Amino acid sequence: MAFYRDHIYPHLLRVLGDPKPIQEVRQRVVPLAQGDVLEIGVGPGVNFVHYDVSRVKRIYALEPNASMIRLAEQQRRRTKLNVEYLDLPGERIPLPNASVDTVVSTFTLCTIPGVVEAIRGIARVLTPGGKFIFFEHGLAPDPRVRRWQQWSEPISNWLFEGCHVTRDIPSLISSGGFRIEQMETAYLAPFPKSWTYCFWGTATPRSQ
């Protein structure tokens, strides 16, 4: 499993994880980030090219997989971003309270084991007035698709290193202490529908 995680999975994610419909949403949501930014689960760095350099001061890139960081650094070199890599799991955010203006998470909440703990950590590190930008996939509204999600989740869990396609993303964000400001949802690919029901939008901590 270590060989798959370190040498195959990063390249698989780079090839399969950014089809055109997903790219189009990234192009809409990632440029909303501003100031000091924390990106949870940077992966191979596909978001880097979508940040607005004129609005972003620095990016803390949280990613526990060293092979992913190497791929992300290749993407970083295509930009003028100031990136600092943090090689820890998403539940453990090594930043002080109220230290970042924006947190970005794309296709990460599905894989973090302690996801509610991670979301509470996101709320902790955001400054007053800060925003959480999310773009995730998860539990579909259609009963038939949900049955396929339950059946196929062991496959996605193995293939994508712990990916859970049955997580209710809006409920998890709310349970983690956030108020969702705006959100859109859609199936972003006709197949497999069970893996491509997505949520994207912004949220703020309820304490703000």
Image (spheres, rainbow, N blue to C red):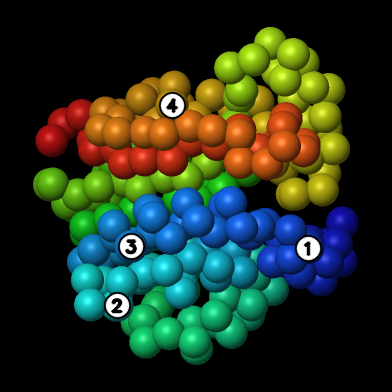
Give residue 12's mark: 1
Give residue 34's mark: none
Give the number of the mark in front: 1 or 3.
Answer: 3
Q: Which residue is under mark 3?
A: 31
Between disc 3 and disc 2, whose residue precedes?
Answer: 3
The spot of residue 139 in percent (x, y) is 61, 24
**Who is closer to the viewer here, 182 or 168?**
182
Separation of marks 3 and 4 at Cα, in angstroms: 22 Å
Number of numbered labels in the structure image: 4
Q: Which residue is under mark 4?
A: 170
| Residue at the spot 66% in from the left edge and 38% down from the top edge | 196
Q: Which amino acid lies under the numbered mark 3 shown in the image of this protein?
A: Pro
| Residue at the spot 78% in from the left edge and 30% down from the top edge | 153
Q: What element carries label 3?
A: helix
Q: What element carries label 2?
A: loop
Q: Which residue is under mark 2?
A: 53
Between disc 3 and disc 4, whose residue precedes?
Answer: 3
- The answer to whether residue 198 is above or below residue 7 is above
Badge 3 vs badge 4, beta-carbon distance below 8 Å: no
Separation of marks 3 and 2 at Cα, in angstroms: 9 Å
Separation of marks 2 and 1 at Cα, in angstroms: 28 Å
Does residue 121 appear to the left or right of 45 in the view shown? left
